[in-house]
Amino acid sequence: MSPEHMTPIGRRLLDRRSFMKNTGFSLGGLGLAHLLAGEGLASSENPAEFSGKSPIRPDIDPDNPYLSRKGHFQGAAKQVLVIYCPGAVSHVDTFDYKPALAKFHGQKPPGMPAVTFEGPSGNIAKPFWEFKPRGQSGKMTSDLLPKMGELADEFCFVHSLHTQTSAHPQGENFINTGFTMEGFPSFGAWATYALGSECEDLPAFVAINDPRGLARSGKNNFGSGFLPAAFQGTDFNSKNPPANLGRPMDYSASDDKNTVDLLQRLNAKHLEKYPGDANLAARVASYELAGQMQITVPEIMNISNEPESIHKEYGSESGTELKREYAKNCILARRLLEKGVRVVQLFNGSDPSGGNGITNWDSHSDIADTHAMQAEIMDQPTAALIHDLKRRGLLEDTLVVWCTEFGRMPFLQGNGTGRDHNPEAFTCFFAGAGVKKGFSYGASDEYGFKAAVDPTSLYDFNATILHLMGLDHERLSFYHNGLERRLTNVHGHVINDILI
């Protein structure tokens, strides 16, 4: 082809100066690759993670991906209960006591933004509920959640959390998957990928959705992302059992058993043709687990056989219908943990389409009414659940994590009745295995506006949860699209000060 018929790019490739430049860059790249290979950083067999540590791959039997596995070291917690509150609970109205809000009530906040997530900011507002000292620790918590406040001596508060986003979908993604974007594995998926399950006839990871439905990010909050599908959360609650488990009315138990036996033989023969196919094995394991769940799930969901004292303690027969249904979900969570389910994620709030405090904690207006409504649903059942776990000795091996995606502002919005999103400071707490009791870590500033003492990222938060389960967050990774991916991305430090 003559030069005049070539494209400009093609002609540049024939230019001597361009050829020398491209050759120099190429040789430099080859040299870098050789040096990285010599350091073990480019090896496909043992790639090093960003931290310089090599990944620890869980030894997963493809024919039985749910088998219990050892962690990287002995962890304090064998199981985790995550109580997640979508919508952003107001820390300054619940667990983060700020006397300055009462002192400057009704005044314009000094040095704070004139416009926030949803528009103009208003005046500083004191807490809508009175704070009182609780327990022997004297921890100041508000009357919004009095039953949970009574358990303050069991809790390990983190008051200096901050996040990367002030939008709910991205905030939910970030706290539950470590990334604001969708498509990444949830915490529960990472934990069960690494550790498997102690329970053979129930899912390793169960997501108990709110009676009102899914949270804003939906199944991404408990999905497996690019991890094998076997490790995604199975979602159901006390009212709605897992889908497609029921046997047709005209199909006898004997017919069902014969069908299952035949399928097991056929699946085993098929697996012999494709040994080591993790995706195929995960599908087969999922179907076999579903067969086992046809027997175990109805039994574990039958909370009517709980003693009357338990129903009274949890409040499953009193209050609003939403509170009663959430209380039943709390009883179900305890029953799942008793059976050895590795991770239980309990949702208090939904909001697939927005709700402004009606379906979750997102109180942009009428916070006095909307937060009170959510608290009436959550307070008694959640406190009863934690107390019940302690009474049964389950807190010795179970880590409880109460969390929300971000906080709320110390000042009101322009409408004068609600608080806007605050990603700069919020509070979550731990309880149970491996953490200090009646302890508070970090602090926000005097207004609760920004994390001020020991600022703690959600990377640190998730790194600490993994550590308590015996997992090194820098070494628990999965090779995906050329990168060693992990829950904490390339960040995070364990919060050692809260550990026993």
Image (cartoon, rainbow, N blue to C red):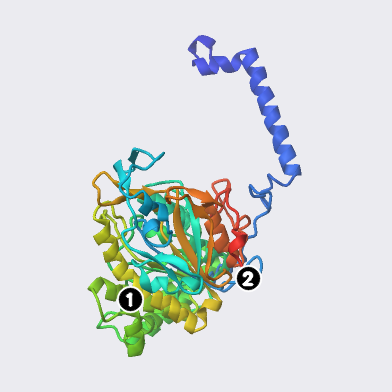
At x 49%, y 53%, the residue is 161
Residue 54 shown left or right of residue 83 in the figure: right
Q: Quadrant of residue 249?
A: bottom left
Of 71 and 275, which appears nearest the observer? Answer: 71
The label number, if any, that marks residue 70 in the structure image:
2
Which quadrant of the structure image shows residue 404?
A: bottom left
Q: Position of residue 226 (x, y in %)?
A: 49, 55
Q: CA distance from mark 2 to mark 1?
A: 33 Å
Residue at horizontal 58%, vertical 49%? Answer: 491
Q: Residues within 10 Å of mark 1 (few under 14, many from 20)?
A: many
Which circle's residue, 2 or 1, is located before the other in the chain? 2
Q: Amino acid at mark 2?
A: Lys
Circle 2/circle 1 CB separation < 8 Å:
no
Q: Residue at x 58, y 70 (%)?
A: 434
**In the image shown, does 369 or 401 lie closer to the viewer?**
369
Q: Tag on residue 49?
A: none
Q: Secondary structure at mark 1?
A: helix
Q: Which residue is mark 1?
A: 327
Q: Secondary structure at mark 2?
A: loop
Asked if one can make out residue 225 in the rendered structure from this viewpoint, the answer is no
Q: Residue at 27% across / 57% down in the picture?
A: 367
The kind of residue on which mark 1 rests is: Ala
